[in-house]
Image (cartoon, rainbow, N blue to C red):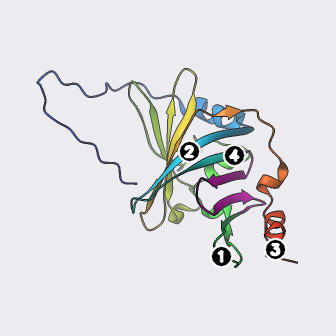
Amino acid sequence: MKHVFLAAALAATSALPALAEPIALSDLSDYLNSLQTAETSFTQITDDGAISTGTLYLQRPGRMRFEYDNEELLVMAGGGQVAIFDGRSNTAPEQYPLSRTPLNLILAANVDLGASGMILDHSGDDTSTRIVAQDPDEPDIGYITLVFTDDPVELRQWIVTDATGFDTTVILGGLQTDVDLPSRYFNIPIELRVRGLVE
């Protein structure tokens, strides 16, 4: 979603968030690498105004699952692929390589935000640290903006901007980490069989 910041001149003493030293890239990399499994609620907002909610499951490296509330939609990442299942259709899901999405940057086996050419912006204020990152080997696929809070460091939001400039914002609830997650949550072939889409 396109972020719109409304500024009202209510008084001369109105203050914007003070600039602060952002969390170091090395600390953010360590935090992401420490995430093994996690579960959280999410709210998704797209550029066209669509708002969805659901539950996100994450298992690093390379696995993510979005279960949408009140929608027959499931998005899975596993086995190097991303699959979008639409329960209203009997056709095979749309699939594409995980490496062709900026989410691959946080699902990598070893996240190194200090890698050359990866970080486009790194800034902070009193409430959060924001980084904008791209895959230096695949700059044409778009980029991802990650928002973290401090003390303790926690990922709170991301915005994926695709190659066309379309934004998808995902706002996270509090992450429950080190949770037990079934391997089938991230197994696209099993999901295909369960849905009767393959023999």
Q: Nearer the viewer, mark 2 or mark 1?
A: 1
Within 10 Å of the Cα at label 1, are there few (<14), some (14-19), or many (20+) other Cα atoms? Answer: few
Q: Mark 2 or mark 3: which comes first in sequence?
A: 2
Distance Cα–Cα, label 1 vs label 4: 24 Å
Helix or strand or loop: what does disc 1 sit on? loop
Left or right: 159 with respect to 99?
Answer: left
Q: Amino acid at mark 3?
A: Gly
**Residue at label 4?**
57
Which label belongs to residue 89? Answer: 1
**Residue at label 2?**
42
Q: Nearer the viewer, mark 2 or mark 3?
A: 3
Helix or strand or loop: what does disc 4 sit on? strand
Distance Cα–Cα, label 3 vs label 1: 12 Å
Q: Mark 3 or mark 4: which comes first in sequence?
A: 4
Q: Mark 1 or mark 4: which comes first in sequence?
A: 4
Q: Mark 3 or mark 1: which comes first in sequence?
A: 1
**Residue at label 3?**
196
Using the rendered view, name the quadrant where residue 88 is placed.
bottom right
Left or right: 10 with respect to 195?
Answer: left
Residue 51's x, y, as percent?
46, 54
